[in-house]
Amino acid sequence: MAVQNVLVQLSLKDAPTTAVMTTNLTRFVLDLGEVWLGTGPDGRAKAMARAGRTGVAIAGFVAGSCLGAWCQAHVGLWSLVMPTSLALAALVVTYCSRSFMQAADHAESPVRGEGA
C-alpha cells in the first residue's frame, strides 16, 4: 500500500489517493463544504474540481466493492482470480512496454540497477 501511495503521489500529482479511502472521503466532504459554504469564487472552483476527481475515485471504489462482494457470494474464492490476473497483466504490459524501458534507462532508479 505504501508503494501504491508513493507512485500515485509522484506520477499523478493532482489525482486522489488510490489506497486510503478514508482520506478520499474526508477530502471530498471538505471540498463539498467549500463549494456550498465557501466565500471566494476561486476557492469554490478549485474545490469543485477536486471534488469531481475525488468523487470518481469514490464511485470506482464503491463499484469495485460491490462487484467483489457479488463475485465472492456467487463464485467464492475463485473470485480472486480476476483481480490477480488483471494485476499480473498490468505488470506484464508495463514492464514490456518500450516507453517504460526507455524511462527506466534514463532515470536513476533501482529498477534498472542504477542509483540506490
Image (tube, rainbow, N blue to C red):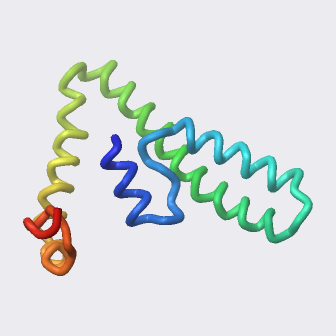
Q: Position of residue 58 (x, y in %)?
A: 54, 44
- Residue at horizontal 15%, vertical 48%? 88
Pick the quarter of the image with the C terminus.
bottom left
- Does residue 105 appear left or right of residue 20 in this picture? left
Residue situated in front as seen by the camera: 53 or 75 = 53
Residue situated in front as seen by the camera: 38 or 85 = 38
Q: Is residue 89 above or below residue 61?
A: below
- Quadrant in the picture for residue 10: bottom left
Considering every residue shown, the one lying at the far right of the view is: 39
- Residue at horizontal 76%, vertical 67%? 45
- Quadrant in the picture for residue 52: bottom right
- Residue at horizontal 86%, vertical 69%? 41
Q: Position of residue 64 (x, y in %)?
A: 41, 38
Pick the quarter of the image with the N terminus.
top left
- Does residue 42 appear left or right of residue 81 in this picture? right
Q: Is residue 49 above or below residue 20?
A: below
Q: How many marks?
A: 0
Residue situated in front as seen by the camera: 80 or 13 = 13
- Residue at horizontal 56%, vertical 41%? 23
Q: Is residue 103 above or below residue 23?
A: below
Q: Is residue 71 above or below residue 90?
A: above
Q: Position of residue 65 (x, y in %)?
A: 43, 33
Q: Position of residue 30 (x, y in %)?
A: 73, 46
Considering every residue shown, the one lying at the far front of the view is: 116
- Does residue 34 appear left or right of residue 103 in this picture? right
